[in-house]
Image: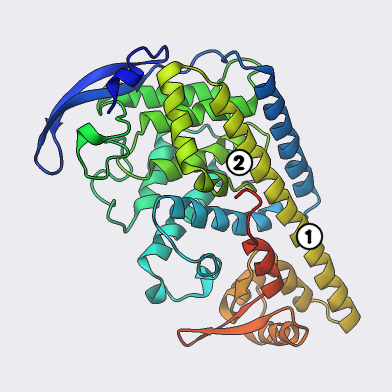
Amino acid sequence: MEARKFANSPIGNLIPIRGTDRRGAPYQDFAFAAHPLGQPPALATSTWAQVSTANRALGRLQQGSLVVINPGLLRQPTVRREAQSTSALEGTYAPLEDVLAADVIEGSERSPALNEVLNYVTAAEGGFQWVQQGRAITSGLLCDLHRTLVAGTAADTTEAGRIRRVQVVIGSRGGRVEDARFIPMPEGPALEAAVNDLLAWMQFPPTDLDPIVATAMAHYQFETLHPFNDGNGRIGRLLIVLQLVALGVLPEGLLSVSPWFEQRREQYQDLLSHVSATGEWDDWVAFFAKAIEVSAVDSANRISGLVDLQTAFHETLRDAGARGAVRDIADILIGSPFVNIPNLRDKTGLTYQAVSNAVRRLVELGILEQRNSAGVMAFRAPAVIDIISAPSSAG
């Protein structure tokens, strides 16, 4: 690591480290230990203008979610889009249609990459349930999220679900510590204390601190601490949305932030490094606020499209004289565009025959189309999928 870059940082200090890397080679270098977060930074007028714009975008997203009878229904496609994007950012790729169709894909037919992406979905849903119960984000929650995220992967070791007990480095392609772009603070009690300090700060931020600025600062701190041996990027981006929900500026996890960061990976990393080196927050906060703004606009547009499509479905069904189970299943499709008879039976409580009749009618009306995968009959709602999978305006 270029230690001299961080030598005069006002918000952290260098700690000498030495040891043996995973190749068995000895190393001697420095790690950066961030100081606990404190009072809000002084920000430029232009930065506050971007923060204000982002807050308005979040307000429009929140307003849009209020017109949806069941906003939780729309969280599923949002979380799955985020799961696909945030995993791709870390090198794990599964097609979005497979992620959306996972509930109708036999477990044995799922690829390891798809299973890893679905781990994120499970972790996110658990996190949203936690914060919506009014519970504080704790170290225990973070560890549970990490354990779920890495289950069944190469990172599912004795370190899963634990604050790391080893030194890690970031951005070293050859594995040499000395070649790392950044080295976070060493493992041990000081790291555990730093994580707890961050979570306490998130729960009780300085009075009147804008929630977007608070979330930007917390995300910087989490990624700089790098508390896990793997999965910090995905957990950190999930934590952004969890914090916004916990702060009351989002009613549901209807925000996908990773497409913005995925398209700007190098700038993202450089800005985090700049904060560590200089203690100057403006560029990072403005960048982060722009990410929130564009992501919120993108999510609001998708929600609006899905609500309009739901209305169009209702009109089609009304004109065809279809009601009851057919309409109930059409509403389910807005959040779950891939279905089969057994999972619809479970969701609706209807008989197998009633579900089959309703699905057949929806196929006749062009709302559903049949898809056979690995010998399993399933159905997809192409109009819903088109909205969910459209290129992101956050990209």
Is there any visible trace of residue 70 in the rendered image? no
Eyeballing the image, is 358 above or below 260? below
Q: How crowded is mark 2: few (under 14 residues within 10 Å), some or many (20 or more)?
A: some
Q: Residue flagged by tag 1: what amino acid is it?
A: Val
Dot 2 or dot 1: first in sequence order is: 2
Q: Residue at x 35, y 19 (%)?
A: 6
- Report the quarter where the N terminus lies: top left
Q: Which residue is drawn at 25% across and 29% down?
A: 187
Is there any visible trace of residue 329 in the rendered image? yes
**Mark 1 element type:** helix
Q: Residue at x 49, y 37 (%)?
A: 267
Query: Which mark's residue is nearer the viewer, 2 or 1?
Result: 1
Residue wearing tag 2: 132
Eyeballing the image, is 352 above or below 136? below
Please tell me which residue lies in front, 238 or 41. 41
Residue wearing tag 1: 307
Q: Residue at x 73, y 39 (%)?
A: 57
As drawn, the label of residue 215 is: none
Is 14 situated left or right of 350 in this image?
left
